[in-house]
Amino acid sequence: MRKRVANSTMGFPSRGFSNTMFLKRKIIFAGVAGLLALEAPAQTVPPAPANNSRPMRIVTGGTGGGNDFLSRILAQGLTSLRGQQVIVDNRPSGVIPGEIVMRSAPDGHTLVVYGSSFWTAPLLQETPFDPIRDFTPVTLAAFTPNVVVIHPALAATSMGELIALMKAKPGTFNYATSGTGSANHLAGELFKVMAGVNMVRINYKGPGQAISDLMAGQVQVMFATATAGLTQARAGKLRALAVTSLKPSALAPELPTVAAAGLAGYEAVSPYGIYGPARIPAALVNDLHRDILDILQRADSKTRLFAAGLEIVGSSPAQLTAAMKADQLKFGKIIKAAGIKIE
């Protein structure tokens, strides 16, 4: 459009036009050009920033533990980065945090931070939501591997020796878990299937009592959280044999993986995902993803998360969805075969 105006203006002095007509036309086109000049910048003005006047809420499980710790680091970072109040809303662990967020408005003001039980729960019990259908993934923020720890009296110094010992005396050894369907429970059941061993599960109400009984020799094996397992192993109260991540962990560089003991593909970690309710606009998801990754990559965040036993991932939303589906497929088979249910 501008090109045609310029050509017409350049042709004004040609024959057939009076000076008066030329002047009038010039004034008219100058006015049009001025209006176009005023309108042009409006087309390149970036969209208005999101409404940060309302508090933002991160819903998660009970106080203490990886979910709560990660939520508080994110809340502090988002408050500083966005100039927006961000509240951590601790609720009883289970399906309650997910149900709250599922019913929230898809405006980016409510998120849930939760581990793999968020997407394995529907495999174990009736839940009011579908973790794939009813939520918008933001990022797989971090994960912590479990550590295979045993009582020091057990005659095994490697995973290979432990497997051989269990195969020689099937059903003789037991392992501790901190709840039905917990990460350490599913890690143990996956190990039983892949290693072809039979060990008896002893369930506890929480990880603290399970670790205590392991140190006392009441149970022989546990797929403990990295923080608890490594602390006691480095103090000489337990023996650590391997990490359950697919690759060696920076948290315990001295330990091999379970997969290296001949169980190719073995992986059972505790991931921490971040989600919003379904149908959050893509632009808001992109903003949240960018800001959360900014916080995770800060030096102080890395230091604090590493000290708490968390390794940073910072995946794309699509990668989080893929991880959820892969875990549901893998552990769905284990749960069905073992008949695991939460009553």
Image (cartoon, helix red, strand yellow):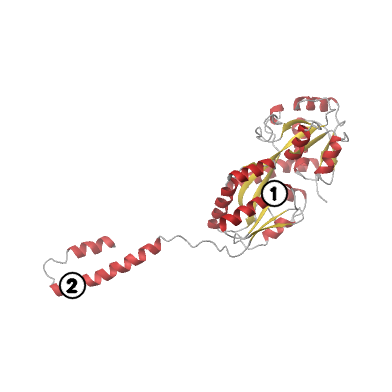
Between 341 and 51, the one lying in front of the other is 51
Vertical relation: 258 (above or below) 125: above
User: What residue is shown at x 83% (from left), y 41% (from top)?
Assistant: 210
Residue 164 versus residue 216: which sits nearer the camera?
216
Q: Which residue is mark 2?
A: 23
Question: What residue is drawn where x is 27% and y is 71%?
Answer: 31
User: In the picture provided, is 274 more to the left or to the right than 90?
Assistant: left
**Which of the two residues, 143 or 201, is positioned nearer the viewer here?**
143
In front: mark 1 or mark 2? 1
Q: Quadrant of the N terminus?
A: bottom left
> Residue 200 at what x, y percent from top left?
85, 36
- Relative to 257, is 200 on the left or the right? right
Q: Residues within 10 Å of mark 2 (few under 14, many from 20)?
A: few
Of residues 223 and 137, the one nearer the viewer is 223
Mark 1 lies on residue: 69
Report which quarter residue 170 is drawn in. Answer: top right
Residue 190 picture location, percent across and down: 75, 37
